[in-house]
Image (spheres, grey):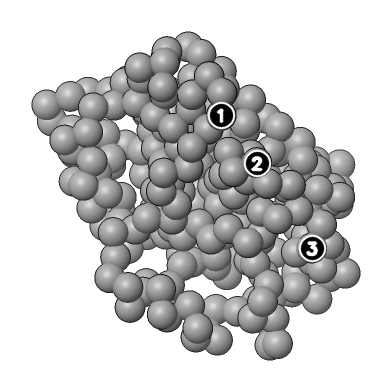
Amino acid sequence: MTLVLVVRHGLTASTGKALTGWLPGIPLDDRGRQQAAALGARLAGVRLDAIVTSPLERCQETAALIAAARADEAAALHVDERLGECHYGEWTGQPLKRLAADPLWKVVQAHPSAVRFPGKDGESMLEMQQRAVGAIRDWNAELGRDACYLVCSHGDVIKAILADSLGMHFDMSQRIQVDPCSMSVIRYTPLRPFVLRMNDTGADVTAVLQHSSKDGAPAKGKESDAQVGGGEGAETR
């Protein structure tokens, strides 16, 4: 079997507020660095054969902080562009509250498999899923059946990977919650993947209860919407 720990990057100043996509120069803030360091400490005793990260700064920084906690074991760190954020095209850099008024927002919520983001650089969400899942499969093959490795990526990308592992139609992926610096664990076997853990932040259950708050919703009356990009999670509210 191959064990994959899939981690979303830690918080940034814009997480849950704007859709940063592939914009450069978006580092972790103090909260995000604390989250990544804490996760690194939790995983310090876990054997990792590799750490694979999206090329974007917030993921590379998260991965580096996790690796730094491994004083006794230096897992090789690799950058894979296929694990980068979805290319949101003209949506990139826009406030989430503004995007929630766009007619395309409803399609993203209900039928993400039909979405291609506007603009010449816009990517379809299915294309994003295909490249991300392909990356996981390739790393599984390269590292071998007895490997355990960590992948650091983005909210929508991780939802896509989890949906594939759960055998869900991609349109159901918006039912999956992926908080900042959360960890999901997938065991890949020759027959099928097994999802062992999802959205684990190691937090108290009160953090889950905070999801009932209206704070951070993309727009008034949109409490059943999933935030494109993944949102800022419960613990920051």
Which residue position is annotated with label 1? 192
Dot 3: few (<14), some (14–19), or many (≥20) neighbours within 10 Å? some
Report the quarter where the N terminus lies.
Answer: top left
Residue type for callout 3: Ala
Q: Position of residue 118 (x, y in %)?
A: 86, 51
Dots 1, 2 in contact, CB < 8 A = yes
| Between discs 1 and 2, the one toward the N terminus | 2
Quadrant for residue 10, please give it.
Answer: bottom left
Give above or below for 209 relative to 49.
below
Image quarter in which the C terminus is found: bottom left
Q: Residues within 10 Å of mark 2 (few under 14, many from 20)?
A: few
* Residue ID for mark 2: 167
- The CA distance from mark 1 to mark 2 is 9 Å
Q: Which comes before the other along the chain, label 3 or label 2?
A: 3
N-term mark: 1 or 3: 3
Query: Does the image show residue 138?
Result: yes
Question: Which residue is drawn at the image coordinates 81% and 48% (left, top)?
Answer: 113
The residue singled out by tag 3 in the image is: 110
Alpha-carbon span between mark 3 and mark 2:
18 Å
